[in-house]
Image: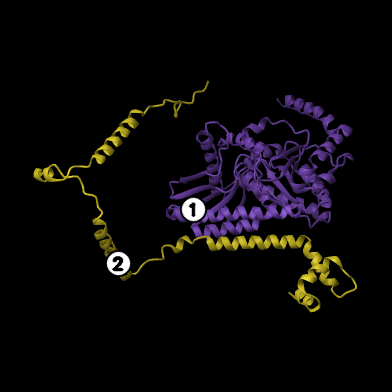
Amino acid sequence: MGCCFSSDSETTDPDGDEVKPLIPDPNQERKPTNGSERNADNLPSNRTDEQALLTVILQRTALNIIDVSAVDSQGMEQHEYMDRARQYSTKLEVLSRTLSQKKPVPLPSLTSQPHQVLAADLVPHADVQQVSKIAAYAYSAISQIKVDAKEELVVQFAIP
Amino acid sequence: MSIEYEEQLAGSLVDSFPKDFGYGVENMDMMQENLENSPSADNKPRILLMGLRRSGKSSIQKVVFHKMSPNETLFLESTNKIYKDDISGSSFVNFHIWDFPGQVDFFDPTFDYEMIFRGTGALIFVIDAQDDYVEALGRLHLTVSRAFRVNPEINFEVFIHKVDGLSDDHKIETQRDIHQRANDDLADASLEKLHLSFYLTSIYDHSIFEAFSKVVQKLIPQLPTLENLLNIFISNSGIEKAFLFDVVSKIYIATDSSPVDMQSYELCCDMIDVVIDVSCIYGLKDEGNGNAYDKESLAIIKLNNTTVLYLKEVTKFLALVCILREESFERKGLIDYNFHCFRKAIHEVFEVSGSTQRMGGATVQSSPPSCSGNGLSRLKSTALNGTPRSLV
C-alpha cells in the first residue's frame, strides 16, 4: 500500500508498473522499493502465495463441513410441532379433495351386489389390451430366466 | 554348521569384492546412471538406507514398499551394489529409496558421496540392536558427519532395528545407550547442530511402518495443512481418530492431532490389507485390467466392541481410515458429506503444490500422484501380494 501511494505521488499506477521493470534507476529514492519488489519475485513470494492459497482451502473447508453434533440440538418446540401438524393436515385435506376428482374409478368388486356390476359401464377395450400386453411381457421375461453355472465361489483349499 | 556359515560368508566377501572395488567400471556405471537419471532425480528427494552389513536395510525396503513377508527376508542375499528404487509410480511416497551395501567405503576416492548427499532428503541409518553396535555407532558417526558437511538440510534418522527379540527393559536400555553414545560422539566433534531421531523398529510388527511414516512426514511440505484438514474433518464428524494412508506401503502421511496409539494404527493397517485382498479377489473387472483399489473403494468394519472402522478413497494412492463409535456412525450421511468436502480440499492442496512447482518453486518436494501405465501395473502386482503377515 505504501509502495502504491509513493507511486501515485509521482506517476499513475499503470505507468509506474510499466516504468519499474524498464528503468531500475539506482540513483532514485525508489531503490529499496525496487529491491523489495525483486524480492517479491523470488521464492518467499511463491511460498507466501502458496501458503495463502492453502489457508483459503482450509477456511473454505471449515465453512462447508457440517458439525454433526449440532444436528441433534435443532429440536422443535411442542407448540410449534402441533401447529405444523395442523398446517400439514389442512393442506393435505385440500389436496385430497382436489385429487379425488381425478382419481380413476376402480374396477367393481365381484363379491357382492352383482346387479351393480351388470349395470356398470364396460371396461374400455384399450385397458383390456394393455393388461394383456403386460401379462405377455411378464410371461416372456419369466420364460427367459436361465441359470448360468460358473465356477464355485466357495472352494476348498487343498495342499497339492 | 558354524564352519559352513563362515565359508558362505567368505564366499560372499570374495564374490562382492570386484563389484565393490571395481574402481573404473563401478565409477563409470554410477556416472552413467547419474546422467541418465538426472532429470527425474533432480525433482524427487532421496531417502538413503545405510548401515552395516546384515543390519536389515534391504529387508526394511522389501517389507515396507514391496509387501514381502518378513519371513521371506531371511533368504535375501547381501546387497552388493547401490539399489535404487523409484517407488513414485506406485505409491504416493514420491521419493527414491536407495539401499546401500553395508560395505561401502566412504574413504574410497572414487566414491562420489557429495553427489549422493546433495540430493538427499533423509538418511536412515539402520543399527542391528541384537548385535554389538559399537562398530555401527562408529560408522554412524562417520556417515552423518560427512553427510552433514555436504548437506546440513538432511534429516538424520536412526532405526534401532531387530528389537523384536528384546525385552521391553532391554529395548529401553539399548535405545538410551545408543542415544547417549551417538550424541556424545557428535558433541566431541562439535556437531551439536546435527540432530538425530531414534526409532525402535522391527519388520515383524508395525513399528517399521510407524517409523517410516514419521520419516516420510518430515519430507512432505503440505503436512501442516493436511493435519489441519484432518482436525477439521474429525472434530465436526464425531470421529475419534483418522489416518491418511498410502495404500501401497501402509505409511500414513498425515493424521489428526490426537495422539497415535499403536493398536489403532495396527487395526487400520490390517483393514487396508483386508480391503486390498478382498478387492483383488472380487473387485477386478472381467478383463482383469484395472486396479483393485480405485475411487469407488470403500469399506466399513464393525468391531464387537462397538467401534467402527471406515475406509474411503481420497486419491489414487491415498485412503482415509477413520475410527469412530457406532453411535456416531449413525450419522453416516453427514459424515459422507463432510468427507466429500475433505476430499475436495485434499485435491486442491495438491493442485496448489503442483502449480507452484510448475511455476518454478523448487522447494515443493511432493507432487500429485502421476498416472502411468507402469504405475498401474505395478500397483496391481503389488496389491496382489497384500497377504496378511503371519507373525512367528
Q: Is residue B359 above or below residue B388?
A: below
Q: Is residue B193 above or below residue B275?
A: below
Label 1 sits on what residue type? Asp
Q: Which residue is mark 1?
A: B336
Task: Write down the quadrant of residue B1 in the picture.
Answer: top right
**SS under mark 1:** helix
The circle on residue A13 is none
Q: Which residue is mark 2?
A: A87
Q: Which chain is yellow?
A: A
Name the colour assigned to chain B in the rendering: purple
Q: Position of residue A25 (x, y in %)?
A: 88, 70
Rendered residue at 79%/57% (across/down): B192
Q: Nearer the viewer, residue B319 or A92?
A: A92
Look at discs 1 and 2 and give the one toward the viewer.
2
Does the rendering let one see residue B300? yes
Q: Nearer the viewer, residue B203 or A64?
A: A64
The residue positioned farthest toward the bottom in the image shown = A9
Cα separation between marks 1 and 2: 34 Å
Query: In the image, is A88 to the left or to the right of B4?
Result: left
Rendered residue at 47%/45% (across/down): B301
Mark 2 belongs to chain: A
